[in-house]
Amino acid sequence: MGMTITEKILAAHAGAATVKPGDNIWVDVDVLMTHDVCGPGTIGIFKNQFGEQAKVWNQDKVVIIPDHFVFTADPHAKRNLEILREFVSEQKLPHFYDAGTDNYKGVCHIALAQEGHNRPGEILFGTDSHTCTSGAFGMFSTGIGNTDAAFIMGTGKIWVKVPETMRFEFNGTFPPYIMAKDILLQVIGDIGVDGATYRAMEWAGDAVMKFSMEERMTLCNMAIEAGGKSAIIEADEVTADYVKKRTDKPFKIYHSDADAGYYFKKTYNADEMQPMVAKPHSPDNKALVGDVSDVKIDRSYIGSCTGGKVTDFRAAAQIIQGRKVKVDTFIVPATREVEADLHKEKIGDKSLAQIFEDAGASLGEPSCAACLGGPKDTFGRANGKEVVVSTTNRNFPGRMGSKQSQVYLASPYTAAASALTGRITDPREFLN
């Protein structure tokens, strides 16, 4: 029997001819990423286990991206940044994108892609559950805890159990009102928040391969919300073009064998997809947008690693242009590059940023912001019993701040349409 793309990458990094699901193997790691929330804990364990004077296994392979709690007066958040700075200085690490500097980037998962750290065929571990986003580049990428990260930091290796693979194939063409977020919410709703536990979610089919890299990143981003170990999309010319613009490091593209063994396969007709939401308080609590159109909202939030890329804002601006929002609407670019694109990209004679400002929306600094609730002064944070429609990835109680708030997860199209009406709204009302 052949191997899936995930199995091939893991085998190559274990120095093995073949691996199969359930095998426990040592793999060599290409990139370790950490940020301001988990970085200090990882550094503490690293020093405790390897010694105060220990050096990281490879300076070029450690990437540190503060992004979660960076625009705040909170003293604990500030202390975390200081710990990162001290460590980077001690270790002379070249890939540190520090907050408050010209080198600050923003949300780690998008910055990894934009700064050329995502490369097909590689293995990337990050101290963040949404590290699965990078699987969009045809690589094995997953989130780990601080202890595992500290071990990688010292050795460059980690012990991995090879996951089973679930394949989700979309054939045909997605309608113009459908975004990757709708597909995700459909699939997570179908299999449940534990449906892919410790499995690789492989996205495939003509419709998926027509997606841009940004939409592919959205598709892989929420594997963890289905319990997934990782997500992956085979690399193609679209992937290679994106990567070559951002790095000159070599990479290898792997493909799943025709006779590869899968735990589960499901095929969807892309043409039949509908705009979806996830109702409170779980990402698998799916509903058609039309079935919740009587739900009044207090705010709309467009941002995060899931919904804060320029593709997401282009979609939102298409709907919002020339109109006024009816509820508090927060626009939070994932990175500085996305923020710059908001001012560069135009629809007609107005930039995307101008369209949002004219509509009455508030623009925030590039960061995770309210997606993780954050300190009390976090931009866009839910502070009371608000009903929020959001392009983020989780809607657990308290995820965006207040435990009394209710969060509906949706695509940028749906979040924008809802901002205009003050209720959850099918984007087709404005796109036809």
Image: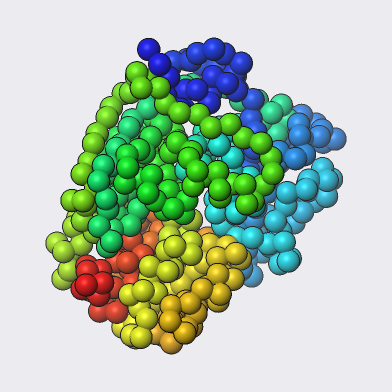
Q: Nearer the viewer, residue 275 or 378?
A: 275
Q: How is the image coloured?
A: rainbow
| x, y percent for residue 239 | 51, 45
Horizontal side, residue 424 vs residue 299: left or right: left
Horizontal side, residue 377 vs residue 268: left or right: right
**As displayed, is residue 329 above or below residue 409?**
below
Q: Nearer the viewer, residue 7 or 45?
A: 7
Q: Nearer the viewer, residue 163 or 52?
A: 163
Residue at image location 72% in from the left, 52% down from the top: 96
Residue at image location 22% in from the left, 41% down from the top: 268
**As displayed, is residue 238 above or below residue 315?**
above
Horizontal side, residue 357 vs residue 390: left or right: right
| x, y percent for residue 24 | 51, 16
| x, y percent for residue 385 | 32, 70
Residue 255 appears anywhere in the view: yes
Which residue is outermost to the front? 237
Residue at image location 43% in from the left, 81% down from the top: 348
**As displayed, is residue 21 above or below residue 171?**
above
Residue 112 appears anywhere in the view: no
**As displayed, is residue 46 above or below residue 407?**
above
| x, y percent for residue 415 | 33, 68
